[in-house]
Amino acid sequence: MKFQVLDCNNKAAGELELSDQVFGVLPRKDILARVVLWQLAKRRCGNHTVKGKSDVHGTTRKMYKQKGTGGARHGSKKAAQFRGGGIIFGPVLRSHEFSLQKKVRSLGLKMALSAKAKEGNIIIVDSLKHDEKIKTKDFVKRFSDVKSALFIDSQKNANVLSAVSNIVCFDYIPQIGANVYDILRRDKLVISADAVKELEGRLI
């Protein structure tokens, strides 16, 4: 599979052969869904919690004598049926993370890249940092016809990150952080030639 490489002026600068083992895998919705759910579960904080009967501040003294009152036989005022009492079976502090096999994660990333390649939504550029003082307006001008995109470079560049972060629906990550969720949530995948080679070396 060959893709055209564009320079900083959006002109052809050659061709790049993409590996079918990474960009030619048949996408499966079930695999992609599993990986996305795994990613989103890891991102959840899980810090929602309430106080149970043992956590509520209050006396443990019996409210009144066991018999002879004509009412129910209550003990602590911290019980759930009283105002200010503890919550029964409420949410607790926990992690929503679950395990997923490495081969499934790797396969999901290959399928996400392959899906973009199959749709023709991959743009390969020779470099994303053609100017050391690149600004947001440079990216807007260079990718004026792109409404939503994920930019993947070989290494993280703070200058490029600052320029891309100012544009709505534009994201920028290094190739080591490439993941299924970020790839699928954007229409276009703009990736540098160096990042393509590093991704192929990591996934093959």
Image: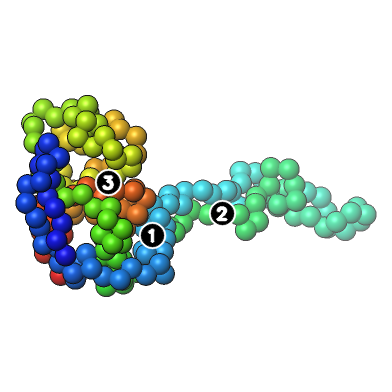
* 92 on left or right of 204: right
- Check disc 2 and give the amino acid type: Pro
Residue 91 — which label? 2
- Check disc 1 and give the amino acid type: Val
Report the mark closest to the observer, 3 or 1.
Answer: 3
Residue 105: image quadrant is bottom left
Dot 3: within a 10 Å radius of its alpha carbon, few (fewer than 14), some, or many (20 or more) residues?
Answer: many
Which of the two residues, 153 or 146, is positioned nearer the viewer here?
146
Residue 4 — which label? none
Q: CA distance from mark 2 to mark 1?
A: 24 Å
Q: Mark 2 or mark 3, which has the lower sequence index?
A: 2
Screen quadrant of the N terminus: bottom left
Q: Mark 2 or mark 1, which has the lower sequence index?
A: 1
Q: Position of residue 188 (x, y in %)?
A: 29, 48
Residue 176: image quadrant is bottom left
Residue 7: image quadrant is top left
The residue sitting at 9% across, 55% down in the picture is 15
* 96 on left or right of 186: right
- Check disc 3 and give the amino acid type: Leu
Residue 36 — which label? 1
- Asked if 40 appears above or below 164 in the picture, the reply is below
Question: Helix or strand or loop: what does disc 2 sit on?
Answer: loop
Could you tell me how many numbered marks the image carries?
3
The residue sitting at 28% across, 38% down in the picture is 145
Question: Helix or strand or loop: what does disc 3 sit on?
Answer: strand
Q: Mark 3 or mark 1, which has the lower sequence index?
A: 1
Pointer 3 residue: 150
Question: Does the image show residue 90?
Answer: yes
* 35 on left or right of 140: right
